[in-house]
């Protein structure tokens, strides 16, 4: 009987398992790995947002290109959404353009807004957007992510493009309405909480062989120096 009890005790003593010290070591290692991985996971998340917003801007450019080609066929001169006519600006940049040289100057001014290091560069949503127009409309809730239009527009000053018909202007709708129609009635929101899609059109002009097309600029106000694109036919 004594032999049996001793055998059982020895058997129990040999049961494999982790000691408290081993458990503490593994826990510490896991905590270190988690702390090390956290910044990387954040980088992946931000990188995904950056790629998504550029993909959305590309979709807008594709639709704007189709719109331009369609209006060129129908109206005789191509224009972009929001333009009442090919030689009318959207926003306040290039409103006085009448020659190709004046257009180049206006485009240079706009491009500096999107160039990091320039004194006029736009790197956030808070100020400097008075000359921009909202792609899908300032009051369209679907065009904002995580915040309301009023929250984001408290300091920023982009506005809606209005229809300003004239005797020779072919446009029949305001800019946001034309963009919404191009996107099947669905607005797109930037993946960033403080993001929003805005645009500018520097007008075209000229006659005959001296004509020059308008230029479209689109940006995400999360950081226009990083998230922007231009379309020049």
Image (tube, helix red, strand yellow):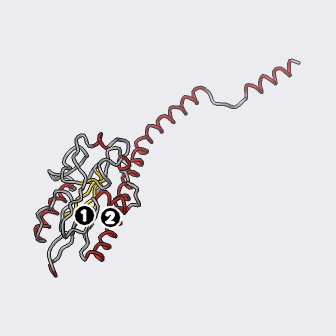
User: Looking at the figure, which quarter contains the C terminus?
Assistant: bottom left
User: How far apart are labels 2 and 1 at the CA level?
Assistant: 9 Å
Q: Is residue 149 above or below residue 226?
A: above
The answer to whether residue 80 shows anywhere in this view is yes
Residue at the spot 55% in from the left edge and 28% down from the top edge? 24
Residue at the far bottom: name it: 209
Q: Is residue 43 left or right of residue 80?
A: right
Q: Which mark is residue 216?
A: 1
Q: Mark 2 — residue?
A: 61
Label 2 sits on a secondary structure element that is helix
Asked whether the viewer can see residue 226, the reply is no
Q: Is residue 111 left or right of residue 189?
A: left
- Between 84 and 68, the one lying in front of the other is 84
- Residue 90: quarter of image: bottom left
Q: Position of residue 136 (x, y in %)?
A: 32, 54
Label ID, residue 230: none
CB under 8 Å between callouts 2 and 1?
yes
Quadrant position of the N terminus in the picture: top right
Mark 1 surroundings within 10 Å by alpha-carbon count, few (fewer than 14), some (14 through 19), many (20 or more): many
Q: Quadrant of residue 2?
A: top right
Q: In the rendering, at what x and y percent does residue 94 appear?
A: 14, 62
Please, what secondary structure does the residue beneath circle 1 have? strand
Q: Is residue 83 left or right of residue 4?
A: left
Q: Position of residue 177 (x, y in %)?
A: 32, 58
Residue name at image x 42 percent, y 45 percent? 40
């Amino acid at each position: 009987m004594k032999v049996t009890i001793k055998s059982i005790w020895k058997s129990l003593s040999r049961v494999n398992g982790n000691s408290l010290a081993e458990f503490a070591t593994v826990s510490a290692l896991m905590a270190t790995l988690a702390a090390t991985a956290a910044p990387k996971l954040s980088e992946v998340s931000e990188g995904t947002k950056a790629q998504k917003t550029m993909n959305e801007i590309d979709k807008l450019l594709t639709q704007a290109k189709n719109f331009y080609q369609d209006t060129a066929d129908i109206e005789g001169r191509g224009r972009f959404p929001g333009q009442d006519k090919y030689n009318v600006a959207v926003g306040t940049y290039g409103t006085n353009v009448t020659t190709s040289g004046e257009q180049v100057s206006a485009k240079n001014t706009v491009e500096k807004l999107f160039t990091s290091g320039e004194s006029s560069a736009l790197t956030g949503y808070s100020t400097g957007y008075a000359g921009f127009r909202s792609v899908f409309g300032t009051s369209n809730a679907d065009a904002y992510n995580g915040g309301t239009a009023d929250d984001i527009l408290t300091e920023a000053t982009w506005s809606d493009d209005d229809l300003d018909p004239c005797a020779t202007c072919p446009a029949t709708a305001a800019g946001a309405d034309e963009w919404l129609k191009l996107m099947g009635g669905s607005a797109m929101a930037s993946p960033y909480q403080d993001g929003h899609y805005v645009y500018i059109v520097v007008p075209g002009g000229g006659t005959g062989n001296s004509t020059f097309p308008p230029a479209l600029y689109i940006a995400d106000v999360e950081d226009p120096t990083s998230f922007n694109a231009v379309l020049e036919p």
